[in-house]
Amino acid sequence: AQTVTQSQPEMSVQEAETVTLSCTYDTSENNYYLFWYKQPPSRQMILVIRQEAYKQQNATENRFSVNFQKAAKSFSLKISDSQLGDTAMYFCAFIETSGSRLTFGEGTQLTVNP
Amino acid sequence: GAVVSQHPSRVICKSGTSVKIECRSLDFQATTMFWYRQFPKQSLMLMATSNEGSKATYEQGVEKDKFLINHASLTLSTLTVTSAHPEDSSFYICSATDRGDGNEQFFGPGTRLTVL
């Protein structure tokens, strides 16, 4: 069974600074997708970034980028130029390419301080 | 982008009553819909997976007679909490996928259920 681990329950960062959230996963599959979701106080789940396991290049979406280390089964999220609106719970998630079941990590509560 | 709606956004009911929550995919056909439960400051817990026209697949430990799921069309799934009790109070989230690019799931805004 796949597992996703986020070892940082809470993190904080000053506005405009950079922060990295950690995520590790365990799977025997070779083809899969990894996601970072953001859940702000409204509790709406928002997709931040997605990585296909077969792609070596790390995904980037504006201020958000990932460091995908397939051999180490690590998938960290870097947020640059943090903004107050980035304050949210962040979930790392995994899904097999052939599967439908999304496996979530425990979440990291990020607070951006002014 | 794909939009998923949920209705109602919040509901308060008396113990022993049944509550129905609707989940709709507004601009795509959802081959599969998912229902999650989330407690405060915790992750999402998958309750069940439903495919249009077939019976839902429940996760271990989820009572299928208590949480009735119907996926009658490619755009609508419903979750009915039967004979609700205070311990059923939670935040319920649905998601939907068309099994397209990246197996991405699109999430509804959630429903806060409070059972008195």
Image (cartoon, coloured by chain):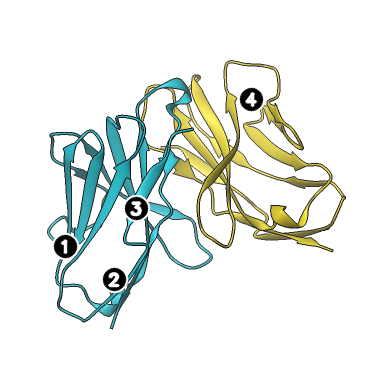
Chain colours: A yellow, B cyan
Answer few, some or many: residues within 10 Å of disc 4's Cα (few below 14, many 20 plus, some between 14 and 19): some
* Whole-number angstrom distance, CA of label 1 to CA of label 3: 20 Å
Residue denoted by label 2: B88
* Whole-number angstrom distance, CA of label 3 to CA of label 2: 18 Å
Residue denoted by label 3: B6
Residue denoted by label 4: A70
Tell me which corner region of the image, top left, top right, bottom left or bottom right, holds residue B106: top left
Q: Secondary structure at mark 2?
A: helix
Residue B72, x across and y down, in percent: 15, 40
Which is more N-terminal, label 1 or label 2?
1
Q: Amino acid at mark 2?
A: Asp
Quadrant, the C terminus of chain B: bottom left
Tell me which corner region of the image, top left, top right, bottom left or bottom right, holds residue A49: top right
Q: Secondary structure at mark 1?
A: loop
Residue denoted by label 1: B66
C-beta proximity under 8 Å, tags 4 and 2? no
Answer few, some or many: residues within 10 Å of disc 1's Cα (few below 14, many 20 plus, some between 14 and 19): some
